[in-house]
């Protein structure tokens, strides 16, 4: 097998594949990328057994052949070569010899037959959606996923098809993000799937902010996303996501309207002196004014005041400052609304212009 490619033509697809490949692998083959020639051109494949990405490198037809090559090493070599270099890769025995100008590299290969692939079954649901909208839906919710929680189903993001709506829900048990978008196809039955954490982050990384469509395919155990140049497949988490509707407050009587950027900046400043472990801040509500106070074990204190629209009774409530900042940062409009009932119940944060996206945060005892 031998191919010749422009360095710039290979660099971006290789970066996509290397992002999926883990640095430390129990199986050596998983640190390799599979390079395949075929009727549809040259493709690169990377996998960690949970997610898999196949990227088209070149559209030129080539005789069918394949080889594996160390993904990270090849990426580092390509990055170090001069721009517009021509790269020639040839397989010689169990080695791959790469030449570019007067540079020469010899890399170890492994048998292509040993390279694993994610076996997918028949797809039960297929639909096309704009890349930009799917990426936005995931970006507005993904940060609320749990990290290494024993409740393994929380270490992912729920995608739910209901009627002509696609809903994304993520929670770590202390906060929750919900966002919705319209879909062209009417799903008569409620369909739920939990995408693992890495799968969510990779989809966000791979998608563009373009109006081009992405084709989503859903099977019993897998989700696949395909664009013109790449195919991404992820296993789904086998579990039952908790009933998030029970967490959504039926009614909240106290409403606070405020400027998003002013509030976010004040919270960022207060966070500097919050307890590094518990990250708590106290919000003090009074008419037309919101006080933000943070303390730490060194007896240091930060206090901020933000003008608000609020005419209800005064009250104090504590929150994890990071949870509030991340929710507010995910909203793009100038104004936001906070609704709550009392110091012991959750707070809902949303934009008046986008009620399809909501963030629910449980209070802290300070």
Image: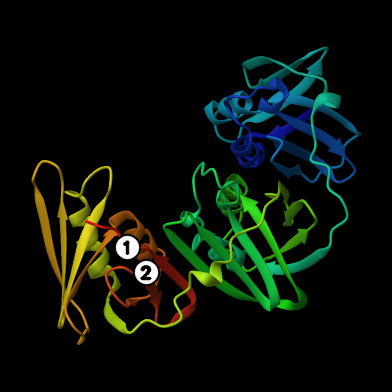
Q: Find residue 33 and report its horizontal and vertical position in percent.
A: 71, 30
Q: Is residue 1 visible?
A: no
Element carrying mark 1: loop
Q: Residue at x 11, y 60 (%)?
A: 303
Compared to 222, does 43 lie above or below? above
Residue at 20% x, 62% y: name it: 282
- On the rendered structure, is 102 left or right of 127? left
Pick the quarter of the image with the C terminus: bottom left
Residue 83 % position (x, y): 55, 34
* Mark 1 in CB contact with mark 2 (< 8 angstroms): yes
Please name the colour scheme applied to the rendered image: rainbow
**Residue identified by numbered label 1:** 363
User: Is residue 94 at all visible to an observer of this figure?
Assistant: yes
Query: Between residues 186 and 298, which one lies in front from this camera angle?
Result: 298
Residue 86: x %, y % from top left: 67, 30
Image side of residue 293 versus residue 187, left or right: left
Residue 68's disc number: none
Residue 18, quarter of picture: top right
Left or right relative to 113: residue 282: left
- For disc 1, the neighbor class at 10 Å (few under 14, some 14 to 19, many from 20) is many
Q: Quadrant of residue 336?
A: bottom left
On screen, residue 240 above or below 243? above
In what quadrant of the picture does the N terminus appear?
top right
Q: Which mark is residue 346?
A: 2
Q: Quadrant of residue 339?
A: bottom left
Q: Residue furthest bottom?
A: 311
Which SS class for mark 2?
loop
Judge by depth and name the residue closer to the eye, 131 or 186: 186
């Amino acid at each position: 097998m031998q191919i010749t490619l422009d360095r710039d033509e290979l660099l971006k697809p290789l970066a996509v594949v290397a992002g999926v490949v883990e640095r430390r692998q129990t199986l050596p083959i998983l640190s390799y990328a599979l390079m395949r020639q075929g009727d549809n051109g040259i493709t690169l494949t990377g996998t960690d057994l949970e997610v898999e990405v196949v990227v088209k490198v070149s559209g030129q037809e080539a005789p069918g052949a394949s080889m594996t090559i160390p993904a990270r090493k090849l990426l580092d070599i390509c990055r170090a070569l001069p721009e517009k270099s021509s790269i020639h890769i040839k397989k010689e025995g169990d080695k791959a010899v790469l030449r570019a100008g007067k540079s020469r590299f010899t890399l170890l290969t492994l048998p292509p037959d040993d390279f694993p692939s994610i076996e997918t079954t028949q797809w039960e649901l297929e639909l096309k959606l704009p890349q930009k909208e799917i990426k936005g839906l995931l970006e507005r919710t993904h940060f609320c996923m749990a990290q290494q929680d024993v409740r393994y189903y929380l270490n992912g993001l729920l995608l739910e098809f209901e009627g002509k709506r696609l809903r994304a829900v993520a929670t770590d048990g202390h906060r929750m993000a919900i966002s919705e978008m319209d879909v062209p196809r009417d799903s008569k039955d409620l369909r739920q799937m939990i995408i693992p954490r890495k799968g969510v982050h990779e989809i966000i990384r791979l998608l563009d902010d373009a109006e081009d469509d992405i084709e989503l395919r859903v099977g019993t155990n897998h989700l696949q996303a395909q664009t013109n140049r790449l195919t991404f497949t992820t296993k789904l988490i086998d579990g039952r996501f908790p009933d998030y509707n029970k967490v959504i407050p039926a009614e909240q009587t106290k409403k606070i309207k405020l400027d998003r950027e002013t509030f976010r900046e004040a919270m960022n400043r207060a966070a500097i002196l919050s307890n590094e472990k518990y990250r708590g801040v106290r919000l003090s509500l009074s008419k037309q004014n919101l006080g933000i106070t943070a303390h730490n074990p060194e007896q240091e204190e930060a206090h901020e005041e933000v003008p608000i629209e609020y005419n209800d009774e005064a009250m104090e409530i504590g929150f994890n400052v990071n949870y509030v900042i991340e929710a507010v940062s995910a909203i793009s409009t100038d104004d936001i609304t906070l609704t709550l009932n009392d110091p012991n119940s959750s707070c809902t944060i949303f934009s008046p212009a986008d009620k399809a996206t909501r963030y629910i945060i449980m209070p802290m005892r300070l």
